[in-house]
Image (cartoon, rainbow, N blue to C red):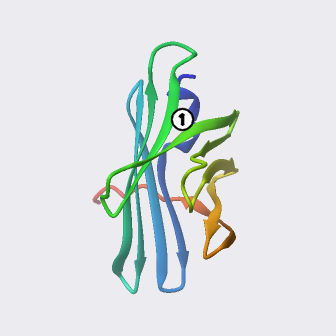
Amino acid sequence: MSLAALSWMLGSWVLVEGERASYETWRLEDERTLVGAARSEQDGRVTSWEHLRIVQQGEGPAGLVVYLASPGGRFPTAFALVEQQEQRVAFENPGHDFPRRITYWRQGEQLCVELQGQEAGGAQELSWCWQREAPPRAAD
C-alpha cells in the first residue's frame, strides 16, 4: 500500500465543544511516512497531546503499514494496518488495553475516529469527528 492512498487524512482538523477543543493534524513527510499531532484543550490550556505517525516498513505490497502513537511523548505503541478502504483505515494491537483498534474515516468534510478496546474491566468505545480547520487568513 502506498501511503499516498491515505491523502484523505491530510490537513488540520478541529472539534470545539464549549470550552473544550481537540485538534489533529496530518501531513505527508515522505512516501513512507505520515506525521500527525493531536492535542486537547480545556479553557485554553493543553490537557493532553500526542505524536502520531503512520509508516510503511519494508518494500512493495508486502510492506507492513504501522500506526505509531506516542501520547504525552511516551515511547510509541504500534498498531498494525488491518483494514483499508477508499476513505477508511483501521489499525489494531490486540495486546494493548485501550485502544486496541483505531479506525479513521472521512465523512464529507469531517475526519472521524473510533477507538475500541478494554478499560476498567469492560469493553470501551469512543468516537468523534473533527471539522476541517480553516486555513489562516493572509494579512491584509
Q: At 48% from the left edge and 69% from the top edge, which residue is drawn? A: 22
Name the residue rendered at 70%, 33% in the picture: 86
**Label 1 crowd bin: few (<14), some (14–19), many (20+), radius 10 Å:** some
**Residue at the spot 58% in from the left edge and 62% down from the top edge:** 130
Q: Residue at x 47, y 47 (%)?
A: 11
Quadrant of image for the C terminus: bottom left
Q: In this view, does 104 lie above or below 119?
A: above
29 is higher (above) or lower (below) than 139: above
Residue 106, horizontal then vertical, whole percent: 66, 48
Q: Position of residue 79 (x, y in %)?
A: 53, 44
Q: Would residue 7 be found to the left or right of residue 116 on screen?
A: left
Residue 73 x, y percent position in the rendering? 30, 58
Residue 72 in which image quadrant: bottom left
Tally of numbered discs:
1
Three-letter amino acid code at the position of disc 1: Ser
Residue with the mark numbered 1: 7
**Horizontal relation, residue 133 to residue 131: left or right:** left
